[in-house]
Image (cartoon, rainbow, N blue to C red):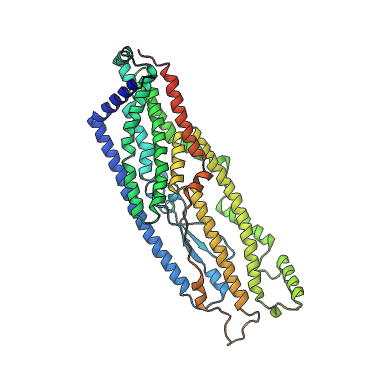
């Protein structure tokens, strides 16, 4: 292929697009909206982070300033932990608006995260949120369609394609040149956005700049591949349409299918093919299994009665009051171990359902390129469901350690003999609460997220290959008249 001819066509296509005053106005408008979305995202992020830090400080102060109490009372007093979104949620908030940010931790019970943005925003959040990622994923492809629908069809109508051929340009060279020229112009919508996103994410102060830069360096090529496929689709539909008007209608239909209908249909199909139990059903099954395994609050429970008998026999005593440690604390520790194990098993079963739904969504990226870029963008920005499950896991690990530490305090420092009326109460000094470390949510590493959710990346490479092969094939079949 004569590259000089291709370069001439690329330069001419790009020049024609750039010199149009209307196109420049559209580009500036889109960039302004992206900057506005980034600015609003930064303001909302800093406001939310400030509130979370204030609540976290308040919860911690209240915990540390609790007076001397029985350890089990403190276990039921509970603790609130908070999830702070990754700063790149300023660019792509992904699923963050639909997932909870606060979990109440207490003994013998594993609560779910609450207080999501969607829960307090009504039905409007279902239509999506205003963000730079939404503009780049959904609006810019529509603009590419309007810019390129007549890029070949119009030239065929004006009989200039035949002139290009007479001057030595083959159909393959024409399509490659037009596609790359349109793609290069589409990058004007993309590349100026990321310096602003990087600056906004860095000044948020929530993550290291190296982490932010690394994530952006994988997001940018992903969007470039996405725009290359959209540009290829636009040029090919234009090349095989009889008129520019029919090309426009066909491309708008493709945009509606890829951006509106398929994503909603895929989501609906995933939820129906792999249905998840309701929250009430999940908690009911969990409670039933815990009661079957052993109820630490029931003195007649078979499991704990057997445990009691074995302890009395081992220490050669007749009553639990004679044991060298606090029996109630030991029972609570055993009960916590049982209930936590059952909860993790049920949570893993539920997680498998969600994982199947997610894999279905990821696999659909091989049908819809929007799903590929959307899922990969969320993964790289740390606003995907996998990152949320890591928060749940960290919170449960913290809850279990806290509950068992409180049980250990009861075992070691509370007597088996109940205090007499008017005597010293069965309590632990208040300074003990200060020894518990505060909960700090750790962001999921980018490498781990991509390893766990690699299919969107493969799908993007698949669409890149499809675009290249389609250009090669169509170049040999381009009709010049």
Q: Quadrant of residue 48?
A: bottom left
Which image quadrant: the N terminus? top left
Which image quadrant: the C terminus? top left
Residue most extreme to the bottom: 422
| Residue 152 place in picture, x, y as percent | 34, 20
| Residue 153 place in picture, x, y as percent | 34, 19
Please give left or right for residue 289 compared with residue 205 in the image.
Answer: right
Q: Quadrant of residue 28?
A: top left
Please give left or right for residue 79 compared with residue 289 in the image.
Answer: left
| Residue 32 place in picture, x, y as percent | 28, 42
Please give left or right for residue 398 compared with residue 8 in the image.
Answer: right
Q: Quadrant of residue 229?
A: top left
Q: Is residue 248 visible?
A: no
| Residue 77 place in picture, x, y as percent | 52, 70
- Residue at 66%, 65% (x, y): give it: 295
Q: Which of the two residues, 359 or 278, is positioned nearer the viewer here?
A: 359
Please determine whether, in this image, residue 233 is positioned above or below residue 123.
above
- Residue at 69%, 71% (x, y): give it: 299
Q: Is residue 430 visible?
A: yes
Please determine whether, in this image, residue 205 is positioned above or below residue 318.
above
């Amino acid at each position: 292929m004569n590259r000089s001819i291709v370069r001439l066509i690329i330069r001419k296509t790009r020049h024609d697009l750039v010199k149009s005053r209307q196109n420049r106005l559209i580009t500036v408008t889109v960039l302004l909206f992206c900057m506005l979305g980034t600015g609003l995202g930064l303001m909302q992020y800093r406001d939310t982070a400030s509130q979370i830090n204030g609540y976290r400080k308040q919860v911690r102060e209240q915990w540390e300033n609790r007076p001397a109490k029985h350890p089990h009372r403190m276990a039921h007093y509970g603790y609130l932990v908070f999830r702070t979104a990754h700063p790149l949620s300023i660019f792509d908030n992904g699923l963050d608006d639909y997932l909870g940010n606060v979990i109440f931790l207490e003994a013998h019970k594993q609560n779910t995260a609450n207080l999501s943005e969607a829960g307090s925003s009504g039905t409007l959040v279902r239509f999506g949120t205003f963000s730079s990622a939404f503009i780049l994923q959904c609006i810019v492809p529509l603009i590419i369609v309007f810019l390129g629908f007549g890029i070949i069809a119009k030239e065929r109508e004006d009989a200039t394609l035949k002139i290009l051929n007479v001057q030595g340009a083959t159909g393959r060279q024409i399509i490659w040149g037009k596609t790359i020229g349109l793609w290069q112009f589409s990058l004007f919508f993309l590349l100026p956005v990321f310096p602003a996103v990087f600056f906004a994410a860095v000044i948020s102060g929530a993550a290291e700049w190296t982490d932010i830069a690394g994530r952006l360096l994988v997001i940018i090529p992903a969007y470039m591949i996405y725009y290359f496929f959209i540009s290829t689709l636009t040029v090919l539909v234009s090349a095989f349409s009889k008129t520019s008007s029919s090309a426009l209608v066909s491309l708008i239909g493709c945009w509606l299918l890829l951006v509106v209908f398929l994503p909603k249909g895929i989501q609906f199909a995933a939820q129906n093919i792999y249905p998840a139990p309701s929250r009430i059903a999940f908690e009911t099954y969990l409670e039933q299994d815990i009661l079957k395994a052993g109820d630490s609050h029931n003195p007649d429970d078979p499991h704990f009665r057997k445990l009691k008998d074995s302890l009395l026999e081992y220490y050669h005593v007749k009553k639990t009051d004679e044991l060298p440690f606090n029996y109630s604390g030991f029972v609570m520790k055993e009960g916590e171990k049982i209930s936590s194990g059952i909860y993790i098993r049920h949570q893993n079963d539920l997680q498998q359902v969600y994982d199947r739904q997610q894999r279905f969504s990821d696999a659909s990226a091989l049908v819809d390129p929007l799903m590929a870029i959307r899922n990969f963008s969320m993964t790289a920005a740390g606003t995907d469901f996998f990152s949320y499950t890591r928060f749940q896991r960290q919170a449960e690990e913290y809850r279990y350690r806290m509950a068992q530490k409180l049980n250990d305090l009861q075992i070691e420092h509370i007597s088996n003999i109940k205090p007499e009326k008017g005597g010293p109460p069965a309590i632990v000094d208040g300074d003990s609460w200060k020894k518990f470390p505060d909960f700090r949510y750790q962001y999921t590493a980018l490498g781990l997220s991509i390893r766990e959710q690699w299919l969107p990346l493969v799908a993007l490479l698949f669409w890149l290959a499809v675009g290249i092969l389609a250009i090669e094939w169509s170049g040999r079949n381009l009709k010049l008249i």
